Image (cartoon, rainbow, N blue to C red):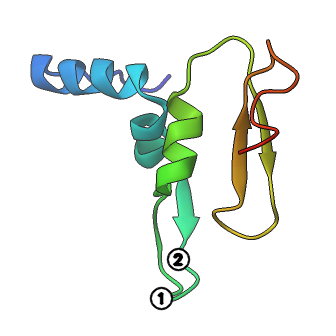
Amino acid sequence: MAKQQKISPVEMEKLKVILKDPVLWAKAFIVARNPETGKEGPWLARDYQAEILRNRDVRKVYRMGRRLRQIRMHDSRCPLAGMYS
């Protein structure tokens, strides 16, 4: 059986902050390869990705284009929301 390591109070506080924020969680636990350098490192969310991950609304719909920055956010409570934006 593996020996359990004790977590310091400072590390425990950092972990609590990371667990509350999905973007920080992804940065801490997801490893991605940088296509420009070819090196592996933490996954870094783009601004619109961070906004999507941090959105805690129960009802949400995202219509995203294939190209970056082509995103429109719609409120699912109103079927016409965002139609004219």
Q: Position of residue 33 (x, y in %)?
A: 56, 72
Question: Is residue 32 in view from this perspective?
Answer: yes
**Left or right of 73: which side holds 31?**
left
**Left or right of 71: which side holds 18?**
left
Q: Dot 2: what SS?
A: loop
Q: Position of residue 69 (x, y in %)?
A: 63, 63
Q: Residues within 10 Å of mark 1 (few under 14, many from 20)?
A: few
**What's the residue type where badge 1 is placed?**
Thr
**Residue 37 image label:** 1
Q: Position of residue 42 (x, y in %)?
A: 44, 58
Mark 2 to mark 1 CA distance (whole Å): 6 Å
For this rendering, which residue is in front, 58 or 17? 58
The vertical placement of 20 against 28, above or below, is: above
**Do residues under tags 2 and 1 come within 8 Å of each other at their CB atoms?**
yes
**What's the residue type where badge 2 is placed?**
Asn
Residue drawn 14% across the image and 21% down it: 8
**Left or right of 6: which side holds 30?**
right
**Left or right of 82: which side holds 14?**
left
Q: Quadrant of the C terminus?
A: top right
For this rendering, which residue is in front, 43 or 29? 43
The vertical placement of 64 against 2, above or below, is: below
Which residue in the rendered view is the most extreme toward the front? 84
Q: Position of residue 44 (x, y in %)?
A: 46, 57
Question: Is residue 30 in view from this perspective?
Answer: no
- The quarter holding residue 74 reads top right
Q: Which residue is mark 2?
A: 34
Q: Residues within 10 Å of mark 2 (few under 14, many from 20)?
A: few
